Amino acid sequence: MDNIPVLKVVIAGDGNVGKTSLVRQYCEGKFETSRVLTIGVDFQTKLVSLPVGLVKLSIWDMAGQERFQAVRTTFYRGSLATALVYDLTDPSTLQNLARWYLEIAKVLPNQPFLVVGNKLDLLPDPDDRIAREFARVIHAEHIKTSAASGEGVSVMFETLARLALANIPTQRMT
């Protein structure tokens, strides 16, 4: 068990898009309709089985409110992949992903990203053309999830784990 690589990943996006709910659904199998605001950062870990073996995801859930921007940048360091999460029912959260992308890419210029539209249970057939185009421009995959139903949540975190594993510098793999 000591040789399991630990992969730090970041979950970022505006407040109330469901970042914490996605993490809780994945790590604990729980969904709570009311949540307390994340202050600064929260994190959880989970073992993930990939085709190459077992990895431990260290999942860093960033506070989405603007007032935490100054502290967030220090928490990005050491991460190997980032999920940019937006709310499928709130177009402004998708528009704000560009700001999130730039904030993180400034600290980690080679960071791989995953664009995640959450709350699929509230909007089962979203028009995601703009999100797919944004993902294409930043060379990211785009997926849709529902923290409430669990739909797409495992795929999201397995994709993050795969992106993080591929982003490990060679010197860290030995």
Image: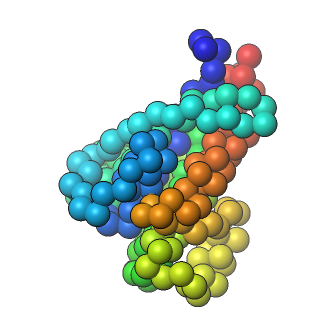
Towards the viewer: 113 or 49: 49
Residue 159 visible to an observer of this rendering: yes
Q: Residue 75: which quarter of the image?
A: top left
Towards the viewer: 26 or 72: 26
**Horizontal relation, residue 25 to residue 34: left or right:** right
Q: Residue at x 47, y 74 (%)?
A: 121
Figure label count? 0
Q: Is residue 164 above or below residue 121?
A: above
Screen quadrant of the C terminus: top right
Q: Residue at x 63, y 30 (%)?
A: 55
Q: Residue at x 72, y 22 (%)?
A: 173
Colour mapping used in the image: rainbow
Q: Residue at x 58, y 69 (%)?
A: 144
Q: Is residue 20 above or below residue 172?
A: below
Q: Is residue 55 above or below residue 162?
A: above
**Horizontal relation, residue 62 to residue 83: left or right:** left
Residue 76 visible to an observer of this rendering: no
The residue most toward the top is 2
Q: Position of residue 98 (x, y in %)?
A: 50, 70
Q: Is residue 1 above or below residue 155?
A: above
**Horizontal relation, residue 62 to residue 76: left or right:** left
